[in-house]
Image: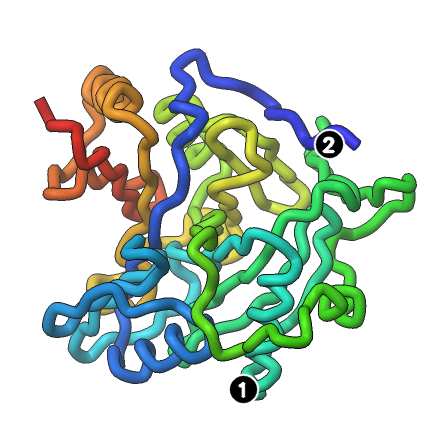
């Protein structure tokens, strides 16, 4: 079965090898969060500097945390709905879900047909998806009328949110697989899903301006998707907090920013030139440039280590 195709490709297409990097969260209790992300998710502590830390694999950060004073959780605002960690295969996803069950940590195994997943939350309520690809099982599609459907490879329809067959998943485990080992080095950030204030404005920003592929807008579901290189989605976005939802106040817990990486200096410079052509405001950092989308979600575009800003 053929994978979903972009609904539209921008004439200023972002490099197809652009990938999600890490999520940076503002947290209330760094110590508790570090225990969770190491013990329950299986990430390695890459570094710590005062009230900030980075966790991931092989020195690559997937999650960064910064503790803030008197932080609060707000509802009805934009920000991050969830971030999704991508495992290389079903066996490693089975280990990840098995680890959560062994710790009796609540999670919701779900079958999206072309991905297998579970959803969980960290101790402060940040939602996390853990998943692997399973395109051989079928596809999910955004139709031209704005509706959404999933379909199994044998033609059966699905709502894309069926209960995951855990017996089938756990059959991929080997007798000597340990649940307490860190995630494998191939693990990476798969995608981000954002709360936004407008589907149309968000699509214009990420697709028309920055050049991500438009992977469809499910208007009835109040959700859209964009990606680099035709992937099913690197950014999902929805208006489930309400059309026109305001950004969170500065003392809000949750999203600080998400990040994307470029495969080459040439791709980075082409992107930077596009941003400057559009005269989009950005903050320059040691890592790259920080933009904000129309919903005030911050996105860091990281320059390759061998690229300069000039």
Task: Pinpoint residue 166: horizontal percent, then vertical percent.
Answer: 75, 70
Callout 1: SS: loop
Q: In this view, does 190 lie to the left or right of 309?
A: right
Based on the displayed image, in which of its 4 quarters is residue 175 positioned? bottom right
Whether residues under marks 2 and 1 lie with C-beta atoms below 8 angstroms apart, the answer is: no
Relative depth, front residue between 200 and 179: 179
Label of residue 141 in the image:
none
Task: Pinpoint residue 103: horizontal percent, then vertical percent.
Answer: 54, 86
Question: Is 293 rendered above or below residue 92?
Answer: above
Q: In which quarter of the image is the N terminus?
A: top right
- For this orientation, the residue located farthest to the front is 176
Q: Can residue 225 be seen in this view?
A: yes
Q: Is residue 164 visible?
A: no
Task: Pinpoint residue 139: horizontal percent, then vertical percent.
Answer: 74, 40
Q: Distance between the residues labelled 2 and 1?
A: 40 Å
Q: Quadrant of the C terminus?
A: top left
Circle 2 crowding by C-alpha within 10 Å: few under 14, some 14–19, many from 20:
some
- For this orientation, the residue located farthest to the top is 11
Report how many numbered discs are placed on residues in the image.
2
Question: For mark 2, what is the residue?
Answer: 143
Question: Is 210 rendered above or below residue 131?
Answer: above
Label of residue 103 in the image:
1
Callout 2: SS: loop
Task: Pinpoint residue 30: horizontal percent, then vertical percent.
Answer: 25, 78
- Residue at image location 68% in from the left, 43% down from the top: 220
- Residue at image location 12% in from the left, 38% down from the top: 284
- Residue at image location 65% in from the left, 26% down from the top: 5
């Amino acid at each position: 079965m053929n994978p979903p195709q972009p609904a539209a490709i921008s004439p200023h297409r972002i490099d197809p090898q652009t990938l999600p990097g890490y999520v940076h969260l503002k947290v209330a209790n760094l110590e508790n969060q570090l225990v969770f992300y190491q013990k329950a998710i299986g990430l390695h502590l890459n570094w710590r500097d005062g009230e900030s830390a980075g966790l991931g694999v092989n020195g690559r950060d997937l999650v960064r945390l910064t503790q803030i004073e008197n932080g609060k959780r707000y509802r009805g605002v934009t920000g991050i709905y969830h971030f999704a960690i991508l495992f290389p295969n079903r066996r490693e996803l089975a280990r990840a879900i098995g680890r959560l069950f062994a710790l009796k940590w609540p999670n919701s195994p779900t079958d999206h047909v072309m991905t297998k997943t579970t959803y969980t939350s960290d101790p402060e309520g940040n939602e996390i998806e853990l998943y692997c690809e399973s395109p051989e099982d079928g596809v999910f599609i955004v139709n031209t009328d704005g509706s959404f459907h999933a379909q199994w490879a044998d033609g059966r329809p699905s709502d894309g949110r069926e209960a995951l067959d855990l017996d089938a998943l756990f059959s991929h485990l080997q007798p000597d697989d340990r649940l307490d080992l860190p995630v494998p080095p191939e693990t990476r950030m798969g995608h981000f899903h954002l709360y936004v204030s407008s589907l149309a404005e968000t699509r214009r920003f990420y697709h028309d301006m920055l050049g991500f592929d438009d992977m469809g807008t499910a208007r009835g579901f109040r959700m859209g998707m964009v990606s680099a290189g035709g992937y099913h989605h690197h950014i999902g976005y929805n208006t489930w907090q309400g059309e026109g939802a305001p950004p969170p106040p500065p003392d809000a817990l949750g999203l600080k920013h998400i990040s994307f990486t470029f495969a080459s200096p040439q791709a980075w410079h082409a992107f930077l030139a596009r941003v400057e052509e559009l005269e989009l405001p950005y903050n320059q950092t040691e890592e790259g440039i920080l933009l904000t989308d129309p919903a005030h979600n911050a996105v860091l575009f990281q320059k390759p280590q061998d690229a300069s800003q000039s």
